[in-house]
Amino acid sequence: MKKILIVLFVYGFISQSAAYDKLSVVERFTNCSCPPCASLNNSWYNATTASLINSGSMTHIIYNVSWPSDTDPMYLLNCADNNNRQRYYGCNGVPWIEINGSRFETSIGQSGFINVVTSGNADYAPFQIMLKPEVFSNNVIDVYAKIIRDSNDNTLFGNIKLRVALIEKEVEFYTSPGSNGELFFYSVCRKMLPDGNGSEFTIPAPGDSTEINMLYPPTEEFLKSVNIENLQVLIFIQDDDTQYIYQSTVANLIPSTRVNAAFQVEDNLGASPFIVNFSDLSTATDTTNIISWEWDFDNDGNIDSQDPAPTWTFSTEQSYTVSLTVSDGNQQHTRTINDYITVLKLSSEILVVNGLHYDTYTTEMEDFYNNSACFGNHQIDIWDLFGDQDFEYHANSNIQQVNLMDRSIPNSVLNAYHKVIWIGNRYFGDDAFYDPLQVLNYIRQGGNFLLATRHGAKFLSGELRYYCGISPRMPALSDVTQLIALDDNLINMPALENHTYVQFVQLNSGSEAIPIFDDDTNTDWIAGFRLQKDNDGAFIYIAGRPYRFDNNVSFQNYNYIIENWLNYTPASIEDETSSSILKRFQLFQNYPNPFNPITMINYQLPLASDVELSIYNLLGQKVATLVDRRQNAATYQVEWDADGFASGIYYYRIKTGEHQDIRKMVLLR
């Protein structure tokens, strides 16, 4: 995930004598396969909004949702932000319109729409927004805004957020992308900066101002889908307590040739120690080149690197402010990004990923987590895909670290856990952060993954479905009254009322998966399975809404699954056993990982070899040698006791006469 850069400055007194003209903002939700949306557009909406926009009477933004078609290309490019705004307003049908943060019923019609926009413009506006968005030769977008407050204002503000959106004025398709026949779409939200949550800013005192700077380096996918020359920047100030919007403004991108310091990272969030590769995106003028770079990675005022693309290791679990100063020999520019890099703390070996929307499933979510339904007696960390939902996870003492992130999980974080339990639901966008290929890679590296969700086909897709040996034909969504246990160690799981949208699977004849749950033993459709291939971690699927089974039964079943099936160890043959013929050299992932302070390292030798197995720190220094002798063809297990070593990332390397391999492990105290 590319990090959006945000810099806040508060400047001195600016004399103002009157309130400002307000510009209403219209937010619309739609989908390219929504017939009523097309009908509304053709009858009056498109012509009316175009007229009001051209006359400077309103600003406009459209969010595309995932229904009735989840293949809407405008939704898919920016699903996280679209889902975020959908959740914010509780949008559950399209077309849906909000004017200045209040719902407008489309049945009121054109004249009513114009009246609401016009009356909104007559409201008192405590802020004025001055906006200057720039685009550089490498397509990097820099947004500068000054927010000025009326000198006579005495408004008592609540939870104020600044929301910034990149909107494409017009998107044209040669053939309709959906089933409603539309070819032209307007004011399409392409990206929100930093995201749909918006950003907090210091509200200036009356008569003062706040300056804000945001940088967006477009992704390759963004550039393929969006016409940069057709982009605008929309900014609005919103109170999240009331959803009321105080002010908005919009401006076209301005091409710029000034010296500009800019950079990005592949991901700004990771587990300690977090190794970050910085990419320089700075630009000079048309006639010069950048000749110097000065990086400060920890905001201490010292130059940490002068390389254009440095690598830095962040170890302490905190957020870091990063700055870069560049020069072309004539001009220099500094960009400072507060809290740009964040290093997370890991407190257990199990991560539970929550995909339940608390406002929708309040009682069910409380009962589910307070009763440890999906993790039994085990201590866990939490990753909430909806961010801060005001849910009190720490009411359960088994829940250790809580990450309220509203984003996908970085690989460095996912791979640091030995077991992951994903509680899916496919409602209000939790599935937007699920990547089946990421899950498959995690399993192949020795991680253990349990997926419990309704709408299973959306999660068991692509290579993961093929890996599991699941038939491409999956049945329609079904209701369920119970899951029947197919293993003597499990018990039947009674379903609560309204247990809908359950999707069963059918295993191919060559599948290695073992059925563990069913809803009807008279069919070949199953409701759950477990799979563990040689040298890979375990994968387990349980169909249905995990929060609508009996929580006491779920507690018992999950507890058994975690301890017995979600507990893969890369190798289990005793030390120096040569009773079987081994076909290839292999170094396995250590277990447990993370560990404290003892872990097991397994490897196999197809031939007798001189073997050296050593431990290295992040600086490449050898800190321990575990094996240094000749060994016969066999599978071996070696213990490393890291007592006395500092927390962090270590590498273990094996060398034989013909082979060598290296893997990473995390010591977590």
Image (cartoon, rainbow, N blue to C red):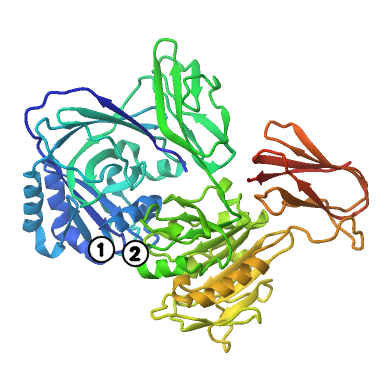
Corner quadrant of residue 200: top left
Asked whether the viewer can see residue 119, the reply is yes
In the rendered view of the protein, which quadrant contains the C terminus? top right
In the depicted view, which residue is nearer to us: 425 or 581?
Answer: 425
State whether residue 43 is above or below residue 159: below
Residue 251: image location, x then y, percent = 23, 35
What residue is drawn where x is 48% and y is 71%?
546
Amino acid type at circle 2 is Trp
Residue 453: image location, x then y, percent = 48, 68
Corner quadrant of residue 358: bottom left
Which residue in the rendered view is the most extreme toward the bottom? 522
Mark pair 2, 1: CA separation:
8 Å
Left or right: where 372 falls relative to 583: left
**Mark with earlier residue (2, 1):** 2
* Residue receiving disc 2: 67
Label 1 Cα crowd, 10 Å radius (few <14 / some 14-19 / many 20+):
some
Left or right: where 558 falls relative to 135: right
In the depicted view, which residue is nearer to us: 368 or 30?
Answer: 368
Residue 411: image location, x then y, percent = 56, 48
**SS label for mark 1:** loop
* Residue receiving disc 1: 94
Left or right: where 591 falls relative to 61: right
Amino acid type at circle 1 is Val
State whether residue 151 is above or below residue 444: above
Corner quadrant of residue 487: bottom right
Left or right: where 198 falls relative to 221: left
